[in-house]
Amino acid sequence: MRIGIVGYGNLGKSVEKLIDDQPDMEVGAIFSRRATLDTTSRVLPVADFAQYKDEIDVAILCLGSATDIPEQAPEFAKYTPTVDTYDNHRDVPRHREAMDKVARENNTVAVVSTGWDPGMFSINRTMAEALLPGAKQNTFWGPGLSQGHSDAVRRIEGVKAGVQYTIPAEDALDRARKGETEGLDGKSAHKRVCYIVADEADQEQIEQEIRTMPDYFVGYQVEVNFIDEVTFEKEHTGMPHGGHVITTGDTGGFHHMIEYTLELDRNPDFTGAVAIAYARAAVRLQEQAAHGAYTVLEVPPYLISPTPLDELIARDV
């Protein structure tokens, strides 16, 4: 499978690296606005994407969720199957609808909102809730760096560098595991902590924009720290993340708890690994003429695996 990588930031670099470990994939091209990149892969102008559509089998859109994916993803889906990592939860239905329209009109496949949340967490929430009807369920993010939120922060005028960490409260985790979830929600159980490099004259306006940013920060406990570039480079260039999906239920007086946990040393690598798996599924769906947009909930698990279905059944069922 010839993979087109659109964008060459942290996620794009991770995808390129991880494709080397796939038995059925190769990098077809990297599409970028920059003419030269530090890579041995073929680099093509992103503006010429349509011209090279027959030279790739699927495009992994390694773009930011704040503006790039909503604005650009439908255009790419006109020409080839696509996979994206759009992570604005509230807006996923609108994004899926927009991508579905374009993909159906052009007989392509668009797998949207892959990654770990949305993505792997979405699957595990659905499975656990189905197993324990009437269950209590909570999702916790972190401790770790959020790529989507960090991207949104960096787009604020005056921000020279910035990251955002999500920190879950330990007492909230304990309550969720016991099923004591009354009054517990995602916003009250987390803190969003930002570290920003900016000129002092811009800091007040930047903090105001962060605190009032809908979907990303409004309603959360937010901490904004302004630091110098040396401190930023020393302490905030790593990309850890993770989290928990905790579901509890009762079956006639018997307590059950299902917990799915991710501990990620490098967020872009894991997000890229998920996108690559769903790129495989996108190619297979395209081959089956199953056009339109799909979330991870709609893709059969065997389609993401390089192992043939018969072998998976013999090994795992």
Image (spheres, helix red, strand yellow):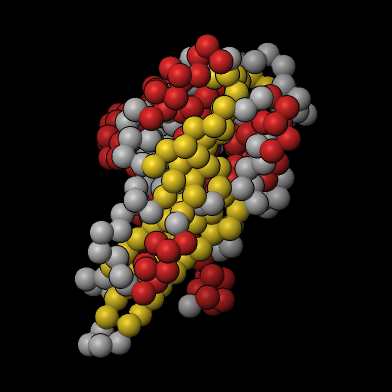
| Residue occupying the point 73% across, 35% down | 234
Q: Nearer the viewer, residue 100 or 179?
A: 179
Instruction: Tell me where residue 60 appears, x and y as whole percent.
Output: 53, 36
Q: Which is more toward the observer, 155 or 129?
A: 155
Q: Position of residue 200 (x, y in %)?
A: 56, 15
Give percent across and percent down for residue 13. Answer: 66, 35
**Above or below, 41 relative to 168:** above
Q: How many marks?
A: 0
Relative depth, front residue between 164 and 137 = 164
Up the image or down, 64 lies above or below 272; here it is above
Q: Residue at x 52, y 75 (%)?
A: 316
- 115 left or right, relative to 176: right
Q: In this orientation, does residue 69 appear?
A: no
Q: Quadrant of the N terminus?
A: top right
Q: Residue at x 56, y 71 (%)?
A: 311
At a point 43% along the width and 17% down the height, the residue shown is 205
Relative to 222, does residue 134 appear above or below in the rendering? below
